[in-house]
């Protein structure tokens, strides 16, 4: 299912290469990884500290925070695609 959702998202947001997108529920990082592969920067968060600790995506364009998406949006000054 993630592949079909991502295919639709990527088709719609392909012109956003170089822009920053926000992943408010990072989880295993599936969405964020695909965004990064398409040349976007990603600001992401997850409430689970274990998710942050076990993140396997090593990319300088990924900014990963522990917390709820509502808190992160308030703290982030960049313009992002939500």
Image: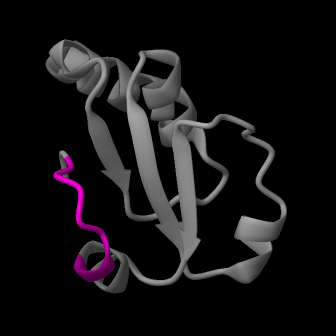
Instruction: Look at 30% across and 40% down and name the residue there.
Output: 20
- Which span is picked out in magenta? 74-80
Q: Pick the residue in front: 75 or 15.
A: 75
Q: Pick the residue in front: 13 or 75.
A: 75
- Is residue 12 visible in the rendered image? The answer is yes
Q: Tell me where residue 17 appears, x and y as whole percent.
A: 29, 17
- Is residue 1 visible in the rendered image? The answer is no
Q: Pick the residue in front: 29 or 66.
A: 66
76 within the magenta span: yes
Main SS, magenta region, reads: loop
Number of numbered callouts drawn: 0
Q: Tell me where residue 53 appears, x and y as whole percent.
A: 82, 68
Image height of 48 relative to 32, above or below = below
Instruction: Look at 50% across and 40% down and name the residue there.
Output: 32
Instruction: Look at 52% across and 18% down and name the residue there.
Output: 37
Q: Pick the residue in front: 10 or 16.
A: 16
In the rendered image, the residue lying farthest to the front is 77
75 within the magenta span: yes
- Specify the quadrant of the image occupied by residue 10: top left
Q: Tell me where residue 16 appears, x and y as whole percent.
A: 21, 22
């Amino acid at each position: 299912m993630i592949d079909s959702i991502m295919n639709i998202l990527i088709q719609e947001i392909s012109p956003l290469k170089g822009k920053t997108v926000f992943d408010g529920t990072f989880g295993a990082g599936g969405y964020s990884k695909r965004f990064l592969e398409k040349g976007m920067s990603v600001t992401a968060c997850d409430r689970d500290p274990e998710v942050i600790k076990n993140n396997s995506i090593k990319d300088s364009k990924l900014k990963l925070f522990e917390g709820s998406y509502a808190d992160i949006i308030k703290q982030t000054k960049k313009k992002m695609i939500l």
